[in-house]
Structures are given as structure tokens and as C-alpha cells.
Amino acid sequence: MNKTIQESKSYVYRIRKYIWISLAIFLLSCAAGFYVAQNYPQEIQAYLEEAKTFFTSMQSPTLWGTFLMILQNNVEAMLLVVFMGIFAGLFSLTFLFANGFILGVFASLLYAQGMLPLFFLGIIPHGIIEIPCMFLSAAIGLQIGEAVIKKIFFKRAGLTAEFSEGIKFAVIIIVPALVLAALIETYITPLFIALA
């Protein structure tokens, strides 16, 4: 157990550059989403309809069913980001931008209605776990992407080891964290939203 924790800490330290890059891209995307929603409300309607359809599909008649759907969606999305690192990490950038942008749009809409506290109450409980998982997944994808570029253009070895290490970290650390985040989002976040 201690060995796994130590290895995980070392891995996070090694990919720290891409964690910071992921954070920066996400924050810029949030700002972009907020700005676009504030200044081009008509253009954002189609985007909102797609988002509404997606979130509606995540509902289930039971809380357990909702938990399973949230978990499946998050695990599939973040593992896909890791696996797609083989395409030079480009999927990580798209993933971060899309999630940051939609978050910024929703923040803008609730802000315009004077309901910004609702936004934070609906995000923070599970987001304090889920959002860092997002950064970690994207960072792993970018790290693998770097290894791919080095392999193709500089004939450097290490791609297989990099890929294996990233997958191992995702399965051991990110997936269990997403289970906890999905439980919180299903059973606890609604209680916070009710306070708004």
C-alpha cells in the first residue's frame, strides 16, 4: 500500500507540468464559456440544447441507477482521454476545453439570474474530487502524447512504459476517486443544491 502511494506521488510529480497546463486550459475555457454566454446568448442556445439532452440522459428512476450512469460516463470519458494520448495528446486538449466551456456557460446563465450560489453548491461537493481527476487524466494523456512524439520524431524508447504507467495510475487512483465523486454527486450534492 505504501509502495503504491509513493509510486503515485512520484508519478504525479513527474507529470506536474501537464497538470498545470491542464488547469490553465480548463480555466481559460471556463472564462471563454462565460464570456460567450454573456455576449452571444443566441449562438449558445444550440449548445445548451445538446447539453440538456445529455444531462437528461443521465437521469434514472432510482438514485442507484443515477450513480451507475454518472460513474460509467465519468470513467469512460477519463479513461478514453488517457488511451487517446496516443494521438499526441490532442484529445486531452479537446476534453479540457469542452468541459471548461460548458461549465463557464452554466456559470454565466446562473450568474445572469442571480443564482451563482446554486452553481457553486451544485459543483463543489463532488467537483473537488472529479475536477482534479479530470486534470490528472488530461495530464496523463498529454504525457503519453509527448512520448508518442518522441517515439515518432526522435526514435526514443519508453512509449510502452509510459502508456502502462499512465493506465496503471488511472485504474488505481483515478477510477476509485471517480466512484467516490459519483456517490457524492448522487447522494450529497442534491442536498447542497436544496440549500440554495
Image (cartoon, rainbow, N blue to C red):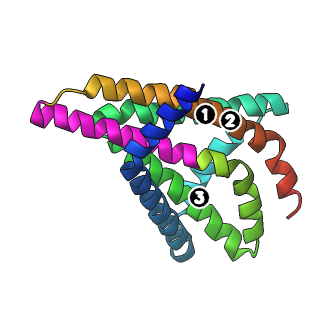
Location of mark 1 (residue)? 73
Location of mark 2 (residue)? 70
* Precedes in sequence: disc 3 or disc 1: 1
Mark linked to residue 2 = none
Q: Position of residue 46 (x, y in %)?
A: 54, 56
Q: Quadrant of the N terminus?
A: top right
Q: CA distance from mark 3 to mark 1?
A: 17 Å
Q: Main secondary structure of the magenta part?
A: helix
Q: Amino acid at mark 1?
A: Asn
Q: Position of residue 154 (x, y in %)?
A: 10, 36
Q: Residue at the location (67% across, 44% down)?
A: 55
In this rendering, the answer to whether 185 lies above or below 21 is above
Is any atom of residue 171 visible in this view? yes
Location of mark 3 (residue)? 103
Q: Characterize the local packing of mark 2: few (<14), some (14-19) or many (20 or more) Cα atoms within 10 angstroms.
A: many
Q: CA distance from mark 3 to mark 2?
A: 17 Å
